[in-house]
Image: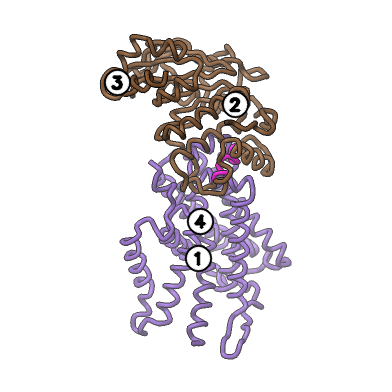
């Protein structure tokens, strides 16, 4: 029983991280039909932004030493600026391109960011301790829950609630949802396309920045590809959840994390190294039965 | 019977008409002057001249494929005419996009509805207000007022994707009216409606010119509704104007009767005769 609860909380915490990243990917896909493979690199960039730029083997904290609130704002700002720059320099020039062209352009952006990080910070992974207090474990009887898991789940809930409020309750949010469904029609009715797109990039930047902080706290190490696995799982989560649906992206994040954590816990020992193969097999099976994901969007299906 | 629209036209904030060449206040006429549209070798409309005036309702009828929607597309900037001009307030509109036309006060609805299905009914209308730069509260209260006027207030929170086909059309009209248009072009708003529903829609459409101070172009297949709603009717067949006149004149017009003979035409002629 204790084991099950522990596994459940592990899955929730991992699912939160996947959901954050999946929402960031889903927002851009919803509005631009952009599958942004440079999203993982924005996460990486957010983590590297904490340390002093140098090729030294040891990571010296810079922004990472600032008070938490200031640090979070600063990292968010840096990643948001990077996200907006990627739009201004690359994606804004190919607005009318096919989704496949946009995706390939995002690989190029990814390559540039990764190599930029390599040039500035060097190729060696560095260890960096962020918020080491969060590794403290809270004990309820036999149950041990790391504080970080609670913070991860709470941060995700707050961000998801904030995003929901923004989309449902504000004028900008309604314009964003309209644009996500039928961009041309929204433009015709006066919705400012560039503002909505900019907002989507900025929001996805904020989500990437928070994911970066949580990921770095958890792993304690920096490398120029650290964001890639998270981005890949988040991408799978958006496919599982239903491309274009934000609720689907979040649900997909949790679904993939639950499959992953529970397989890790309950697969026979000798199969565990192949856990991800099992996760992907489940994803393939699910897509055979629900090809448009758990929560398909009507808008996308009907788009000609 | 139409209940009075609470604030009348004053309630609708006029959008800033920033399109080039359009002077305040609202344009008095929207005209197609000798326009033709060709798609490759195929003429969709040929040398059509039509004038829409503020405060009046003009009907546009014709058999399927007569070029009605193409003409509306020209009048709203969705299609550039191959020849001829579209004039708003007697000024040419060469090179205008659909957004130009919309900002200059030409609003339209679409046959397919084109609502945002994942948004609620009231949000669908609010979006237009947001696009005009209104505050959320103002956009919402205007949207709710329009919904009440169109007798859809009980469906305000319904998802647009879950609406009946016939209600979608009225939401489309509300969305266009929130733009505070000088001209409203309705593309087959009564398609699929029962007689009772189209009668109700007809009385709403008849009230639009006075309530919102705009001109209405009504494209319809439903003869009963067109004859009942419009002051003047313009008839297209195979892309050409074959008649223009009052409903009574159109019903007696030989060219019109000939073009409607065969297939559905005969049935509609009967309806016309029964109705009048």
Region of the chain picked out in magenta, as a range = B121-128
**Membership of B265 in magenta stretch:** no
Residue A32 at least partly seen: no
Residue on which disc 1 sits: A18
Q: Is residue B191 left or right of residue A247?
A: left
Circle 4 SS class: helix
Dot 3 or dot 2: first in sequence order is: 2
- The mark lying in front, picked from 1 and 3, is 3
Residue at (49% x, 22% y) in the render: B229
Q: Chain of mark 2?
A: B
Question: Predominant secondary structure in magenta?
Answer: helix
Q: Is residue B215 left or right of residue B73?
A: right
Which residue is at the far bottom?
A: A141
Which label is found at residue B255?
Answer: none
Query: A144 or B90, which lies in front?
Result: B90
Q: CA distance from mark 4 to mark 1?
A: 13 Å
Circle 2 SS class: loop
Residue on which disc 2 sits: B181
- The mark lying in front, picked from 3 and 2, is 3
- As drawn, A299 above or below A295: above
Q: CA distance from mark 3 to mark 2?
A: 36 Å
Answer yes or no: do the residues labelled 1 and 3 have beta carbons within 8 Å? Answer: no
């Amino acid at each position: 029983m204790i084991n099950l609860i522990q596994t459940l909380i592990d899955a929730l915490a991992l699912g939160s991280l996947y959901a954050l990243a999946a929402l960031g990917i889903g927002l851009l896909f919803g509005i631009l039909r952009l599958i942004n493979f440079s999203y993982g690199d924005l996460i990486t960039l957010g983590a590297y932004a904490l340390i002093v730029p140098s090729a030294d083997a040891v990571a010296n904290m810079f922004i990472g030493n600032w008070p938490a609130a200031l640090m979070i704002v600063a990292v968010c700002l840096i990643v948001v600026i990077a996200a907006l720059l990627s739009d201004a320099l690359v994606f804004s020039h190919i607005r009318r391109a096919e989704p496949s062209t946009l995706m390939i352009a995002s690989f190029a952006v990814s390559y540039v960011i990764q190599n930029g990080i390599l040039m500035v910070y060097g190729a060696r992974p560095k260890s960096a301790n962020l918020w080491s207090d969060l590794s403290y474990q809270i004990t309820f009887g036999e149950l041990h829950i790391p504080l970080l898991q609670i913070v991860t789940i709470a941060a995700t809930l707050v961000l998801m609630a904030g995003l929901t409020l923004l989309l449902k309750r504000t004028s900008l949010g309604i314009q964003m949802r309209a644009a996500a469904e039928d961009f041309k029609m929204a433009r015709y009715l006066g919705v400012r396309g560039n503002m909505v797109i900019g907002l989507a990039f900025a929001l996805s930047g904020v989500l990437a920045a928070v994911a970066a902080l949580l990921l770095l706290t958890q792993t304690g190490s920096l490398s120029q590809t650290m964001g890639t696995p998270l981005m890949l799982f988040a991408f799978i989560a958006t496919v599982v959840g239903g491309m274009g649906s934000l609720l689907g992206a979040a649900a997909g994040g949790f679904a993939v994390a639950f499959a992953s954590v529970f397989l890790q816990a309950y697969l026979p020992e000798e199969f565990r190294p192949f856990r991800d193969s099992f996760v992907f097999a489940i994803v393939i099976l699910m897509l055979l039965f629900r090809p448009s994901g758990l929560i398909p969007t009507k808008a996308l299906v009907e788009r000609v | 019977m139409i209940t009075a629209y609470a604030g009348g036209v004053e309630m609708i904030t006029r959008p800033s008409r920033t399109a080039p060449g359009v002077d305040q206040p609202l344009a008095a006429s929207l005209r197609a002057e000798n326009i033709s549209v060709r798609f490759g070798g195929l003429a969709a409309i040929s040398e059509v001249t039509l004038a829409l005036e503020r405060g009046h309702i003009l009907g546009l009828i014709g058999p399927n494929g007569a070029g009605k929607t193409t003409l509306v597309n020209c009048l709203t900037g969705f299609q550039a005419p191959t020849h001829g001009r579209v004039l708003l307030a007697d000024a040419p509109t060469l090179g205008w996009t659909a957004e130009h036309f919309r900002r200059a006060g030409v609003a339209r609805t679409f046959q397919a509805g084109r609502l945002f299905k994942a948004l609620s009914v009231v949000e669908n209308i609010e979006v237009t207000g947001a696009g005009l730069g209104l505050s959320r509260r103002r956009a919402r209260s205007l949207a709710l007022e329009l919904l009440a006027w169109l007798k859809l207030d009980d469906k305000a929170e319904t998802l647009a994707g879950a609406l009946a086909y016939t209600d979608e059309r009225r939401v489309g009209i509300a969305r266009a009216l929130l733009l505070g248009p000088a001209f409203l072009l309705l593309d087959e708003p009564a398609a699929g409606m029962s007689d009772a529903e189209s009668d109700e829609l007809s009385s709403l459409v008849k009230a639009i010119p006075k309530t919102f101070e705009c001109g209405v172009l009504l494209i319809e297949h439903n003869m009963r509704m067109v004859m009942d709603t419009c002051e003047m009717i313009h008839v297209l067949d195979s892309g050409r104007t074959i008649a223009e006149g009052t409903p009574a004149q159109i019903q007696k017009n030989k060219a019109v009767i000939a073009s409607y003979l065969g297939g559905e035409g005969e049935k509609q002629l009967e309806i016309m005769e029964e109705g009048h």
